[in-house]
């Protein structure tokens, strides 16, 4: 039985985000990168998270470690620019997660920028 992708696209994980996490494909848009990064958080793939973080703002692995969070749902609200032929983009999203069984909501407008021709997460745009 096929598993739905963690990113909430409705597509099968094997055909949606898994190729990005495995290195078999490269996200062509900022939204694809954001969805694949959410999936990486959900499956605890820190290497992918670090690899897809822009070198200007990339933290160390140690800053990402938190095994208590369990990611449950992603909802993309808005995407500005970030197409295959563009160099910058923004994605507004909400994510539901749990810590010790208690649900929380995380809302963020992420900014993305191409680095060496590939999309990278840059930072959070303040409201």
Image (cartoon, rainbow, N blue to C red):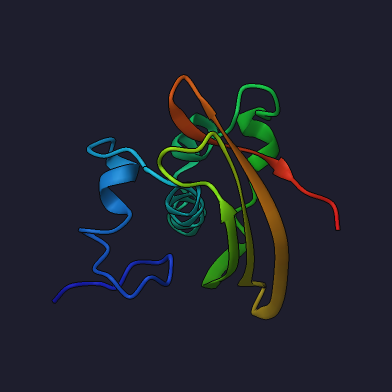
Q: Residue at x 37, y 43 (%)?
A: 27
Q: Residue at x 28, y 35 (%)?
A: 23
Against 69, residue 45 (above or below) is: above
Name the foreground residue: 66 vs 92: 92
Q: Residue at x 21, y 59 (%)?
A: 14
- Residue 28 percent location from the top left of the image: 37, 43
Name the foreground residue: 71 vs 76: 76
| Left or right: 37 as drawn, with respect to 63 | left
- Residue 35 percent location from the top left of the image: 46, 57
Q: How many marks?
A: 0
Query: Which residue, as the protein is rendered here, is positioned at the far left?
Result: 1
- Residue 44 percent location from the top left of the image: 47, 50
Query: Which residue, as the protein is rendered here, is positioned at the far right?
Result: 127
Q: Looking at the rendering, in which quadrant would you find the C terminus?
A: bottom right
Against 18, residue 122 (above or below) is: above
| Left or right: 26 as drawn, with respect to 67 | left
Q: Residue at x 71, y 67 (%)?
A: 106
Name the foreground residue: 127 vs 66: 127
Against 28, residue 54 (above or below) is: above
């Amino acid at each position: 039985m096929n598993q739905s992708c963690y990113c909430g696209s409705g597509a099968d994980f094997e055909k949606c985000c898994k190729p990005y996490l495995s290195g078999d494909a490269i996200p062509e848009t900022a939204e694809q990168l954001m969805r694949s990064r959410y999936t990486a958080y959900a499956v605890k793939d820190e290497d992918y998270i670090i690899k897809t973080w822009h070198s200007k703002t990339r933290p160390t692995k140690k800053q990402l470690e938190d095994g208590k969070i369990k990611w449950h749902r992603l909802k993309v609200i808005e995407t500005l620019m970030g197409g295959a032929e563009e160099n910058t983009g923004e994605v507004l999203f909400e994510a539901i997660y749990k810590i010790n069984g208690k649900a929380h909501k995380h809302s963020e407008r992420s900014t993305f920028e191409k680095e060496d021709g590939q999309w990278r997460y840059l930072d959070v745009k303040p409201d």
